[in-house]
């Protein structure tokens, strides 16, 4: 096998490992939320740019939770380097309509 093909295979394997660990973490957050807050319905749980912080939708509002689901943060997540409001972007994406 040539060297470039080996690099490509290695990169694909690494991408698979990283993406599966990301899904495992989201699943862990889902399980922790269900365990700690069985009466609340958290939807659209996904990872954020911040390690260990996940976004979710609760009663139509974007909230942020840690992996252990011990805390819930409400408010905007701002990326300081470019003052980008990541919460606003997430809400716009969630509310967008695919006209196809």
Image (tube, grey):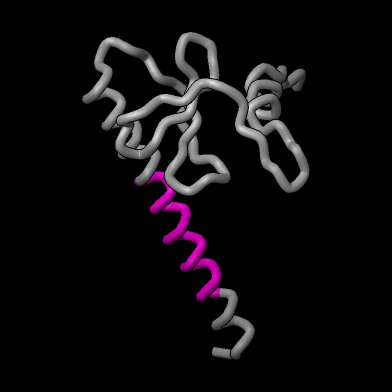
Left/right placement of residue 74 relative to residue 85 reads: left
Residue at x 58%, y 80% (from the top left corner): 7
Image quarter in which the C terminus is found: top right
Q: Nearer the viewer, residue 49 or 73?
A: 73
| Magenta highlight range | 9-24
Residue at x 72%, y 21% (from the top left corner): 98
Q: In the rendered structure, does residue 12 fall within the stretch colored magenta?
A: yes
Q: Nearer the viewer, residue 57 or 73?
A: 73
Task: State whether the magenta stretch is mostly helix, strand or loop.
Answer: helix
Left/right placement of residue 86 relative to residue 72 reads: right
Residue 89 x, y percent position in the rendering: 70, 29
Image quarter in which the N terminus is found: bottom right
Left/right placement of residue 32 relative to residue 52 reads: left
User: Vertically, is 4 above or below 10?
Assistant: below
Residue 28 x, y percent position in the rendering: 31, 39
Q: In the rendered structure, does residue 94 fall within the stretch colored magenta?
A: no
Extreme residue in the front direction: 80
Residue 14 x, y percent position in the rendering: 48, 67
Quarter occupied by residue 86: top right
Residue 41 x, y percent position in the rendering: 37, 14
């Amino acid at each position: 096998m040539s060297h470039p093909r080996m690099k490509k295979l290695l990169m694909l394997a690494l991408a698979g490992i990283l993406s599966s660990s990301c899904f495992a973490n989201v699943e862990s957050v889902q399980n922790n939320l269900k365990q700690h807050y069985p009466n609340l319905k958290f939807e659209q749980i996904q990872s954020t740019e911040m390690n260990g912080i996940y976004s979710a939708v609760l009663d139509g509002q974007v909230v942020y939770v840690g992996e252990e689901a011990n805390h819930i943060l409400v408010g905007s997540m701002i990326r300081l380097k470019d003052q980008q409001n990541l919460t606003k972007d997430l809400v716009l994406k969630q509310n967008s309509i695919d006209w196809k």
